[in-house]
Amino acid sequence: MSQIHTLTMPKWGLSMTEGRIDTWLKREGEQINKGDEVLDVETDKISSSVEAPFSGVLRRLIAQPDETLPVGALLAVVVEGEADEAEIDAVVQRFQAEFVPGGDGEQDSGPAPQKIDLGGRTLRYFDLGEGGTPLLLVHGFGGDLNNWLFNHQALAAERRVIALDLPGHGESGKTLQRGDLDELSQTVIALLDHLDIQHAHLAGHSMGGAVSLNLARLAPQRVRTLTLIASAGLGREINGDYLQGFVDASNRNALKPQLTQLFSDPGLVTRQMLEDMLKFKRLEGVDSALRQLAAALADGGVQRHDLRAVVAQQPSLVIWGAADAIIPASHAEGLPAEVEILPGQGHMVQMEAAERINQRLAAFLASH
Amino acid sequence: MARKISYQQAINEALAQEMRRDSSVFIIGEDVAGGAGAPGEEDAWGGVLGVTKGLYKQFPGRVLDAPLSEIGYVGAAVGAATQGLRPVCELMFVDFAGCCLDQILNQAAKFRYMFGGKAVTPLVMRTMVGAGLRAAAQHSQMLTSLWTHIPGLKVVCPSSPYDAKGLLIQAIRDNDPVIFCEHKLLYSMQGEVPEELYTVPFGEANYLRDGDDITLVTYGRMVHLAMEAAANLARQGIDCEVLDLRTTSPLDEDSILESVEKTGRLVVIDEANPRCSMATDISALVAQKAFAALKGPIEMVTAPHTPVPFSDALEDLYIPTAAKIEAAVHKVIGARSAA
C-alpha cells in the first residue's frame, strides 16, 4: 500500500510565522527515513534542520533554497511505496489550492502561555497537551520556556506538558527572596499545587536539572521520574567563567562569546538570539536575580550542590552532550540511571538534537 | 509572545511607570494635559498628538500645562532639575528650539562643567522631529545634529517602540540633560515591548542586520528605510550591515569602526540637512580612524540643504528614500570595480 506524505514548514515556538529555506540536505529521488534531517530552515530567531516525520522516497522538492514560506506551507512530497507523477501532481495541486497561510488567523487564538500570581509573584507557564501523568519542563540559568521550543509540542502529543519560566527568568517576576535553589524548587512545587498536579514527570536542563533534583529531594512523593539534561547538581565542575561572563555581559560583543559556548554549532548564535538575550538582561531585576542565582549555584568553577544521591529515588534518565563546555558530561558516570551521551553535542543539546531527545524522552516516559 | 504596542504608547508607558516608581518625576509642557485649569474637559489632549494622554488623571498635580512660552517653562524645568526633581519637559516641535535655546545651550548643558561636577541636571526634553507630515518648514525639521553639537547634552532618537520605552526610562534616570527626539511618523509604529521596566543603555548602537559587503549607519526613522534598502540589496547579492545609532550623543564610535573595518564600505543615512550633520560627523570619524579599511568612497544620503518644503511632491523629494540608499550603495560598490 502506498502513501503520499506532504512535508510542510514546521512551527518552532509561538512567534514563528515563516521560515527561509536554507539548503536541502536530501536530493529528489533519495530514500529518507523517519528522523532524518531533510533540509535546513532559518527563522529570525533560530536556524535548525527539519526532520522527516515519516519514511519514504523524496519524490518532489517544492520549496526552493532562499525562498521564505509561511508556517504550514508545502516543502516536499514524500512517497511510501509507489505513486505515479500524476498522483503526486494531484496532491500538490490540492494542497496548494486549500492552503491558507496563517491558518485563518488561528495564530492569535492558538495556545499561549499564561501568567498567574503565585505567592505575590507573577509566574508564566505554557500548558500543552492532555492526559497521562503531566511532564514539567524546567529551563536552565538565564533561559526561559522557549528553551523547549523544539521539544514542547512534540512531547505534548502523548501527554500534558507544562513549561515554566522560573522566578527571575522569562516573563515571570524577577525579584527573588532568598535567591537560592530551594526558592526555585519551592516555586515549582507551588505551581504543581496551583495546577492540582499530585505526581509529575520532571525534566530539567542545566540549572533546571538541579531545581528538579532538589524538588525530588524536598518532595519525593510528587516526582514520578526525573530527566536530567546537561544537569547541574551531579558533580563538582562547572564553567565558572561562563557564568560570570554571561552575568556581566551587557552588550552584544561581550555576550556573543558566552552564548557561543552553549552550542556545538556556533552558527546558531544569531543576531536575533543575542538581541533577545540582551532584551531579557535589560529587564529590571534580572541582573540582580542572575547574580544571586550564580552565587547560589557555584563558587567560581565549583558547584555548591551535590544532589547525586537523589537520582536513585525514582526512575531517572540522564542526557548529556559529550562536548558540553559548561558542565562536563563526565558527571553522568556512575549514576543509577539510564544514561544517554550524545557525541559532539554541546550544552543546549535539547535544542540542537531535539528529535533524538524527544524520542528518547518519550520512550522513557512511556515505560514508566 | 510579547505584547505589541505603538511607539506612542511605549513612550506613554515609560512616563507612567517612571512616575509611579519615582515621585520626583513630573511632566511640563504645552497642552501635555490639555484643558487643565481651563473650562473644558481635563486631560483632553495629552500633547498635540496625544502622547501624554491619560497621565494627568493618573498623576494629579504632576502633569503641568505650561503657558505658550518655551523660554519660561523650559527654564522652570531646568531649574527644577538642579533642585532635585526629574522633569520631563515637552518641546512640542523641535523647530521651536530657538525659543528656549539659552536655557538648554547656556544653562542646562553647562552646569555640571561650570560647577566643577557638583551640580547635576537630570532634565529630559521630549520633542517631535522629522518630516513627512505635510507640516511645512517650521514643524518638520530634523535638528538632532544641532543638539549633538553641544557638549553636556545627551541626544536620543529611538527608531522602534522597544527602544523608545527603554531609552526614555534611561533618559529619565540619567543625571545629565537629555534631548529625546521622537519622530512623528513613527508614533503609530507597532512593536513588541515588555510590560516590565527596562533600560536601553546610551551610546550602544543596535545591529539590525549583519552583513559583510557594506555598512549602513543611520538612526531614527531612516533605520526603516535602510532596512528596506538592505532587503532589496540582499536579493541582488549585496549584504548590508545596518547600524541604528539609537543615541547621537554619546556616539558608539566602536561599533561604527568595527563594522566598517569588516565591510570596508560606508553609507551614512541622515534625515537632517547635510552640513555639519551626523552624516558628515560619522564620515569624518571613519575617514580619520578607519581609512585603511576603506575599499571605496564614503557616501551620504541626506536631505538637501534647504528648508523642508510644504508641497507634497517636493517634501517627498526632500526626504531620503530606500531607492536613494540603494543607489548610494551601488555607487560605493561600483567605485571599486571602476577603479
Image (cartoon, rainbow, N blue to C red):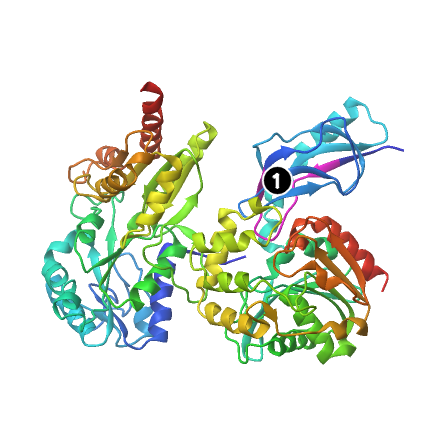
Residue neighbourhood size for the residue with mark 1, other residues' Cα within 10 Å, grouped as few (<14), some (14–19), many (≥20): many
Residues drawn in magenta:
A6-20
Whether A345 is drawn above or below A29: the answer is below
Quadrant position of the C terminus of chain B in the picture = top left
Regarding residue B321, the answer to whether it shows in the image is: no
**Tag 1 subunit:** A
Whether B178 is drawn above or below A24: the answer is below
Residue A2 placement (x, y as % from top left): 86, 32
Residue B208 placement (x, y as % from top left): 42, 45
Whether A136 is drawn above or below B296: the answer is below
Left or right: residue A76 versus residue B283 is right
Mark 1 lies on residue? A41
Residue B322 placement (x, y as % from top left): 35, 34
Quarter assignment of residue A339: bottom right
Q: Is residue B109 magenta?
A: no
Which residue is at the front of the view, B184 or A344?
A: A344
> What amino acid type should be assigned to the residue bearing mark 1?
Val
Q: Is residue A12 magenta?
A: yes
Residue at point 82%, 26% (across, down)? A83
Residue A47 placement (x, y as % from top left): 59, 44
Q: What secondary structure predominates along the stretch shown in magenta? A: loop
